[in-house]
Image (cartoon, rainbow, N blue to C red):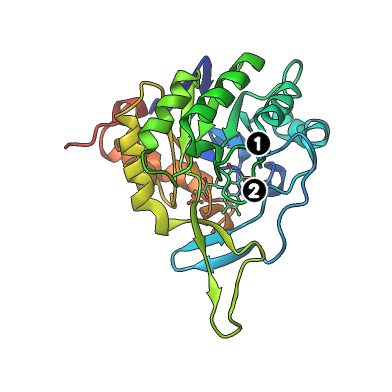
Amino acid sequence: MIDLKVRIGKEIFKNPVWAASGTFGNGEEFEGFLDLTEIGAVVTKTVTYKPRKGNTVPRVVETPSGLLNSIGLENKGVECFKKEQLPFLQDLGVKTVVSIAGETPEEFEKCAEKLTGKNKPDAIEINLSCPNVRHKGTGCRLFAQDPKITEKITAAIKKKTRGPVITKLTPNVTDIGEIARAAENGGADAVSLVNTYLGMAVNAEEMRPVLGNVTGGVSGPAIKPMALRAVWEVYNEVDIPVIGIGGIMTGEDAAEFILAGASAIQVGTANFIDPGRCAGVLKELKEYLLRKKIKKVSELIGKLKV
Ligand SMILES: Cc1cc2nc3c(=O)[nH]c(=O)nc-3n(C[C@H](O)[C@H](O)[C@H](O)COP(=O)(O)O)c2cc1C
């Protein structure tokens, strides 16, 4: 009897446990491991306007308590995604948040345009924070390192779409609160954070980098304390909902992020260890709320005793 509902913009999600982009395919790959209709939403693998091959292999390596990846946004392009991949989750009635990216601000807009009209997703997450792609003509490595570009792209996408827009932030900045404010000024309905932390791995024996791309992004339990701090900081900076991501493996981890200010959370790397983990996190979060006699999950948001 616990009320788990979450509101982002005008959209109501049945609960706050979502699957994170790039770690859950397009949902279909996870059928059979859990009841997909149980979870709050699936954020699909980032799509771009044109197909992308991704980076040179190897693209993934394990690190202590984490994962280092440099996939480089491999995808078949938004046209193909809309026709062949998006309908699976929509036909099941699963809330679908489509993650989009581009090499230029214009590419983000063109991608969002393709996701309007009939069969549009329930929300769009703008991935301004992928550390594994190069951007043209912006002078910064990641769009979400620049408050002006963050605001500009968010505002442009907000104009193109009627549904909620979630801006996904990078933790690879000096002041993440400033970037979150820029997203809010651009009209974002929510911000999600964090994407991966820049990192690299070296093979000393062979005296070469492990990843084909040399550098990549670190995720998993290793980043949880830093992600929690980022969520707490952003929660205290903006008035829009914050979606917490980073090393969430259990329901208790999810509760920690909600206490730090998250309205919803996303499970990422944990899906590679246990493909049914999203359902596990949801079950454990419900058990936590029951134990704490909390009837509405929204009552827990930001309730950290400081
Ligand atoms: C293999 C891999 C691929 C990812 N691909 C994407 C992606 O396409 N788009 C995106 O926004 N984030 C992507 N991410 C980042 C995750 O969505 C998430 O923000 C990050 O991994 C931190 O959460 P975690 O520690 O629970 O994994 C990827 C992460 C991993 C490990």
Q: Amino acid at mark 2?
A: Val
The answer to whether 100 appears left or right of 263 in the picture is right
Q: Quadrant of residue 43?
A: top right
Rendered-image quadrant of the C terminus = top left
Q: Is mark 2 within 8 Å of ligand 1?
A: no
The answer to whether 23 appears left or right of 195 in the picture is right
Q: Amino acid at mark 1?
A: Ala
Q: Is residue 176 visible?
A: yes
Tell me if residue 108 comes above or below residue 252 in the rendering: above
Label 2–label 1 contact, CB within 8 A = yes
Q: Is mark 1 within 8 Å of ligand 1?
A: yes
Rendered-image quadrant of the N terminus = top left
Tell me if residue 100 comes above or below residue 281 in the rendering: above
The residue furthest bottom is 205
- Compare marks 2 and 1 and give the one earlier in the sequence: 1
Tell me if residue 258 comes above or below residue 277 in the rendering: above
The answer to whether 88 appears left or right of 255 in the picture is right
Mark 2 lies on a secondary structure that is: loop
| Residue at horizontal 41 percent and vertical 54 percent from the top | 223
Tell me if residue 111 comes above or below residue 203 in the rendering: above
Q: Which mark is residue 133?
A: 2
| Residue at horizontal 69 percent and vertical 24 percent from the top | 109
Q: Percent position (x, y) of residue 189?
A: 49, 21
Q: Is residue 289 visible?
A: no
Q: Which mark is residue 101?
A: 1
Q: Percent position (x, y) of residue 240?
A: 41, 22
Q: Percent position (x, y) of residue 68?
A: 54, 61
